[in-house]
Amino acid sequence: MNKARARFSPPLWSTILLLVFGALFITAGFWQLDRAEQKRTLFQAFDQTMREPPLDVLIDNSQAGEYQFRRFSIYGQYDPEHQILLDSMMYQGRAGFHLLTPLLIEKTAVLVNRGWFPQAADRMSLPDISVSREPRQINGRLALLPKPGLVLPTDPVDDSSPWPRRLLYPTAGEIQQHLGYPVYKYQILLTDNTEQGFIKDWRPEIPGPEKNVGYAIQWFSFTLAIFVIYLILNLRQPR
């Protein structure tokens, strides 16, 4: 006597759902793997610049991405009367400010990030951020200005507001309007330890690539799970 065999006869709608969700989960998995590779490249670029000699001439704005984290040694003069506080900058889970001081080089300035300090209970209370106009050689790394995840409309420049001015994710163009003279579209992250009181931990403060690899494995596991469920539910046993 021939034994009856199980029949595989999935309905069309279940096959469509499998293809749709399977494609979504696989796409999400590969996107996480791509993010992990981007982070590896970022950390490698940061470490690589330590082995390269510093440059003594600033680059054009269009080359900023190519020279990300590259070391520079620049001679100029600070503008201590027009300093900017980048508001809502996080460090190790705490809110604070990054201090940007323009360094004048001939008729243009580059923004020097002198470090991070925590926000006090009284937001009007600030540490001593004074600096002299004496010409100096500064050493640091090139970096792009921080950008928000969501771009919101900004208020017009108020020339009457006191210095230092608190700005939330300003662009180089907005900073230039406040200063009244041209600035480069990037910043120099100061690495000199001569200035005390500001934290200069410039290594990218983002989760490592291992976290994205873990997320990718989860998405691929979801794909496998729905495929197994699809097989089980549509494999009809004989009566």
Image (cartoon, grey):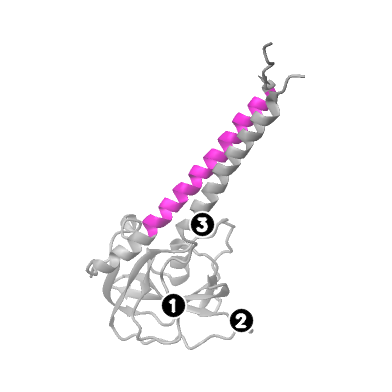
Name the amino acid, label 3. Lys
Main SS, magenta region, reads helix
**Circle 3: is it few (<14), some (14-19), or many (20+) Cα within 10 Å?**
few
- Local secondary structure at mark 2: loop
Q: Residue at x 45, y 52 (%)?
A: 36
- Expressed as whole percent of the image width and height from the top left, the position of residue 178 reads 47, 70
User: Which callout, 1 or 2, points to the residue nearer the camera?
Assistant: 1
Of the numbered discs 1 and 2, the one sitting upstream in the chain is 1
Q: Is residue 229 above or below residue 196?
A: above
Q: Quadrant of the N terminus?
A: top right
Number of the label disc, if any, that sits on residue 115: 1
- The image quarter in which residue 168 lies: bottom right
Residue 34 forms part of the magenta stretch:
yes
Q: Is residue 171 visible?
A: yes
- Expressed as whole percent of the image width and height from the top left, the position of residue 141 reads 34, 69
Q: Is 61 displayed left or right of 205 in the figure?
A: left
- The image quarter in which residue 190 lies: bottom left
Circles 3 and 1, Cβ within 8 Å, touching? The answer is no
Q: Quadrant of the C terminus?
A: top right
Circles 2 and 3, Cβ within 8 Å, touching? The answer is no
Residue 56 forms part of the magenta stretch:
no
- Expressed as whole percent of the image width and height from the top left, the position of residue 185 reads 39, 62
Q: Which one is nearer the viewer's eye here, 174 or 167?
A: 167
Name the amino acid, label 2. Arg
> Magenta residues, as a range?
13-42
Which residue has dot 3 on it? 211
